[in-house]
Image: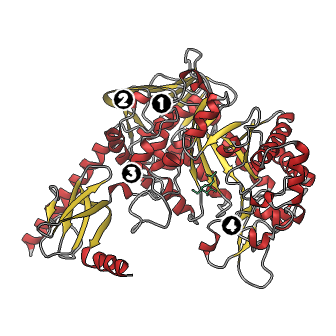
Amino acid sequence: MKANIITMKLVLILVLGLTMACESSIDKEVSIIPQPVSLDINKGSFRLNSNTQVSIAKGTGKTQKVVDHLKDIIDASCEIDLSVVKENPSKENVIIFEICVDIKDKEGYELHVSKDYIHIKAKEDVGLFYGTQTLRQLLPVSINKQHGGEGELAIPVVSIKDAPRFGWRGLHLDVSRHFFSVDFIKKYIDHMVRYKLNVFHWHLVDGPGWRIPIDAFPKLTDEGAWRVDKTHDEWNWRATEMGKPSDGRPAYGGYYSKDEIREIIKYAEERFVQIIPEIEMPGHSLPPLLSYPELVCENNNIAIDGLRGKDVVCVGSEFTYQFFTKILDETMDLFPSKLIHIGGDEVGKSAWKECGRCQQFIKKEGLKDEKELQSHFMSRITEYVNSKGREVIGWDEIMEGGLPKNAKVMSWRGYEGGIKSANLGHDVVMSPISHTYFDLYQGDPSIEPKAYGKLYLTDVYKFDPVPEDIDPAKQHHILGGHACLWTEHVRTPEHAEYMLFPRLLAFSETVWSVKENLNFDSFMTRLEKHHRLLEKDGINYSMSAYNVAISEQIDSIDNKYMISMANEVNRHLIRYTLDGKEPSIHSPVYQGPFYLGNETLIKAASFRNGKRLGEIAEIDLDHKHKIEETNQVN
Ligand code: TNX
C-alpha cells in the first residue's frame, strides 16, 4: 500500500513536472499571427510585474486610450494594475509608447522588448495599438489571476518591425438571418482587433429581419425585426411571416436602437475599426415589401412570390427612390463612414418583367432591359449618396447593366468581377466565396454543424486579394480582402465563434502579412499557441482541421478495400481502430494506405503528445455500401 502511494506520488511529481515544462516551453514560443514583416528573437525576457510602469514618451490626445487598452489586457490576464508615469520614466521595468515620425507606414509599428524595457514606436496611435496587440500575443499563455502581485510575466526579448500589406482588412457579420446582441457585436470587434482587422461590415438588413430603426418608416423594425419562430431552419433564407405574432406563437428577432448603434460605432472607433453599414437593395427586401406595400411591383403576390426570387422592390415607382433615400439619410446621420454598402446582390428580374410600371419606366428612360434597370436604380442611389459627400460600395452584381460611376465593388462570386471592375478603374475589395466565406463547411459535413459548400483552413490560407491575372497597372485598385460570416445556419455567439476560429487567423495573415512571409506549416505551428490563448479567453474555436478524413478504394481484382487517411493539416499522428472501439494512444498509428481484411468499421483521430485532437472520424463500409446498393436499385 505504502509503496503504491510512493509510486503514485512519484507519478504525480513527474506529471506535474512535465506539465510545467510544457507550459513554460509554450510560453517561450514567439507565435505571432499575423506574421510580422520582420522578427528577431533573442535570449532572455522582460519580467512584467506589479512594479512595471507605462510611460508615454511622445503621444497624441488619443495615446492614453491605447495605454488603457494595454492596462485592461494585463489586468484581465493577471490582475496586475500597471501604473502610468508621464515624465522621466526610469529606463528599467517600463513599457514606453512613442509616436515617431520616422516610421513610414500609417498603421506600422516597431516593438522592441529588451530585458529592461519594452518600447513600442509608431507613426500614429493606430500603430501603437497594433504594437499592443502583438505584445499581447507575447504574454505567456499560462498566466492566470494567481500571478497577481506575486508573480512575474516573462515576455521574450524580441525586435519587431511591422506594417500591413493592405489597408482594407475586413470582416462582415449578417445580423439579419439571426440576430446578435450588442455585447456580441462588441466581442466580434474585439476578435477582429486581436488579429489586426480594421473594417467591420455590418449586414443590417435582409429577408429574415430588419435591424436598424428608421424614424421615417417605423414599421421596418416594429414589424420587420420580428418573425414567427416556428422552427429555426425555416428562416435560413427568407421569411414572409414578419411582424410580432399576435396569435401567441413565440416571436424571434430584435434590432439595435440608434443609441446602441452609436455606442457600437464609438467602441469600434476606439479600437481603430471603421464600420460600414449595409442597406441591401433592391433585392433581399422582404421586410420593407411586407410592411410598405407601395414598394411591391404590379402582379407580385409578395406573400407567396416573395419566397420565389421576387423579393425585389419596384424600381419603376418614384416612391421607392424616396423610400431608400430617406433610409440612407438616417443611416448616414448615424454612421460616420465615408462608405455605405448598398447591396445589389442576387436580384431576381422576373418581378420587374411582369410589372407594368417597371416596363414603362424602362421605355421612358430608354433602357435596354431589366439589367439596365437595376443599373439605373443603383446609379441614382449612388449619385444621391455622393451628393451627401459619401461613397458607395456594392456586391459585384452591381456591374451588370453598367457599373455606377464612383462605386466600389465587393467581389464575392469569385475574383473575376473584381478584376473587371479594377480594369475599369474602380476600387475593389476582394471577398471571393472560394476563400473567405466562413459560413461554409470547414470539415467533414457528417460531423460538422449544418452549413453548405466547403472552405477549409488551407483554402483560406491560399487567399490572395491580388490575383495574378490582374493588370499590374490596375493593382492599386485592390484595397484589400474581406471575409464574410452569413448566418442562415448560425444562431448563437458560440456557433459564430466556431465558424470564425481559426479561419479568421488564416485570413488575417493573408491580408496583413507580406506574401514572402506566408507559410502554412509555420502558421499551423504558431496556431497551436493561439489555441491556448483563445481557450484562456473562453473563445470557442474549431479543431476541424485536425479531423481525419478516411477514404476507401476498392481493388476490383482482389475485391479488397484499400484504406487511406489524412488530416487536413498534414501533421500529427493518426491512430485508428478496426474493432469499433474509440481510437486511443494505444491504437495503431497510420503509416500509409493499407488493405482491409474482413473488418468494415474504421475509426480514426489525430493525436499530439498523447492527447486526441478534434473529433473521431468513422466510416462503416457495410452500412455505406448497403445504402449505395439500395440507391442503385431504386
Ligand atoms: C450569397 S454573398 C449571398 C447571401 C447568402 C450567402 C450564403 C452575397 C452577396 N449574397 O445572401 O447569405 O450567399 O453564403
Q: Are marks 1 and 3 in contact (CB under 8 Å)?
A: no
Comparing 368 with 68, the one in front is: 368
Label 2 amino acid?
Val
Q: CA distance from mark 2 to mark 1?
A: 38 Å
Q: Residue furthest top?
A: 102
Q: Position of residue 78 (x, y in %)?
A: 46, 48
Crowding at dot 3, Cα within 10 Å, few <14 / some 14-19 / many 20+, comes out as some
Return the disc, 1 or 3, that comes first in the chain's sequence.
1
Displayed quadrant of residue 211: bottom right
Nearest-to-viewer mark from 3 and 4: 4
Give the label on residue 238, or none.
Answer: 4
Nearest-to-viewer mark from 3 and 2: 3
Label 4 amino acid?
Arg
Residue identified by numbered label 3: 532
> Is the CB of the residue bearing disc 3 within 8 angstroms of ligand 1?
no
Label 1 amino acid?
Glu
Residue identified by numbered label 2: 157
Badge 3 element: helix
Nearest-to-viewer mark from 1 and 4: 1
Q: Position of residue 432 (x, y in %)?
A: 54, 45
Q: Position of residue 537 (x, y in %)?
A: 48, 54
In the depicted structure, whether residue 314 falls above or below residue 631: above
Residue occupying image coordinates x 49% and y 23%: 90
Residue 372 in sight: yes
Comparing 152 with 70, the one in front is: 70
Return the disc, 2 or 4, that comes first in the chain's sequence.
2
Crowding at dot 4, Cα within 10 Å, few <14 / some 14-19 / many 20+, comes out as many
In the depicted structure, whether residue 184 falls above or below residue 344: below
Q: CA distance from mark 1 to mark 4?
A: 37 Å
Q: CA distance from mark 1 to mark 3?
A: 36 Å
Nearest-to-viewer mark from 2 and 1: 1
